[in-house]
């Protein structure tokens, strides 16, 4: 048999090399897609965490901004700060009409959401007239603090989320100017 009569096509070795290369390329593509999905879901979860904290602080900030300074009492409860105050709701001539007392505090939740072996998580709530409104969930132990300086009030909340078995915390701060000055 001479070289001119050689059969066209791929040899068995060439075919095996092509199959191995295609499988390696497929596995690499799948792994890249998987890690991209994990990164996207992690980024989204962290973004939702920050957004929930910001919304809670903006909601509570609207109340705190209008708090009567002499009634704004900041204490500690369940390891976090607690605020009790009233706000101006209307005027009768020159006299302000004050709301019923409002409380901002962290209430414990049942279970161990952050998987640290202790039921120390909470939710930030607003309480007025016996009605409780949840402002945000997954507040860490000691995760709500208020600092007052004359006419400024800085609020801080720390929330957590468990991503792939790892607890991720985010701290959000918000500063309010107290409008009702004496």
Image (cartoon, rainbow, N blue to C red):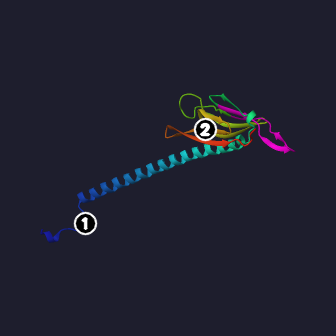
Residue 162 disc label = none
In this picture, is 37 found above or below 162?
below
Determine which residue is flagged by label 1. 9
Q: Position of residue 11 (x, y in %)?
A: 23, 61
Q: Residue at x 62, y 45 (%)?
A: 54
Q: Residue at x 74, y 42 (%)?
A: 66
In this picture, is 85 found above or below 7?
above
Q: Nearer the viewer, residue 79 or 176?
A: 176
- Could you tell me which secondary element the residue under label 2 belongs to? strand
Residue 157 disc label = 2
Q: Residue at x 66, y 45 (%)?
A: 58
In the rendered image, residue 85 lying in the magenta stretch gets the answer: yes
Disc 2 to disc 1, C-alpha distance: 68 Å
Quarter placement of the N terminus: bottom left
Mark with earlier residue (2, 1): 1
Q: Magenta segment range?
A: 81-104
Q: Residue at x 58, y 41 (%)?
A: 172
Q: Position of residue 15 (x, y in %)?
A: 27, 59
- Could you tell me which secondary element the residue under label 1 belongs to? loop
Q: Nearer the viewer, residue 171 or 15?
A: 171
């Amino acid at each position: 048999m001479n070289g001119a009569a050689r059969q066209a096509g791929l040899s068995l070795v060439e075919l095996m090399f092509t199959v191995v290369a295609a499988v390696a390329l497929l596995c690499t593509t799948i792994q890249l897609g998987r890690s991209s999905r994990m990164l996207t879901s992690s980024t989204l979860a962290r973004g939702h965490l920050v957004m929930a904290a910001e919304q809670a602080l903006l909601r509570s900030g609207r109340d705190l901004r209008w708090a009567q300074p002499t009634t704004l009492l900041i204490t500690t409860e369940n390891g976090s700060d607690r605020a009790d105050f009233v706000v101006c709701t209307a005027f009768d001539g020159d006299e302000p009409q004050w709301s019923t007392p409002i409380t901002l505090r962290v209430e414990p939740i049942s279970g161990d959401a952050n998987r640290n072996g202790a039921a120390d998580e909470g939710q930030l709530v607003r309480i007025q007239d016996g009605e409780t409104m949840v402002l945000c969930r997954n507040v860490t132990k000691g995760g709500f603090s208020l600092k007052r300086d004359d006419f400024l009030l800085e609020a801080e909340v720390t929330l957590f989320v468990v991503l792939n078995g790892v607890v991720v915390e985010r701290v959000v701060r918000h500063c309010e100017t107290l409008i009702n000055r004496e």
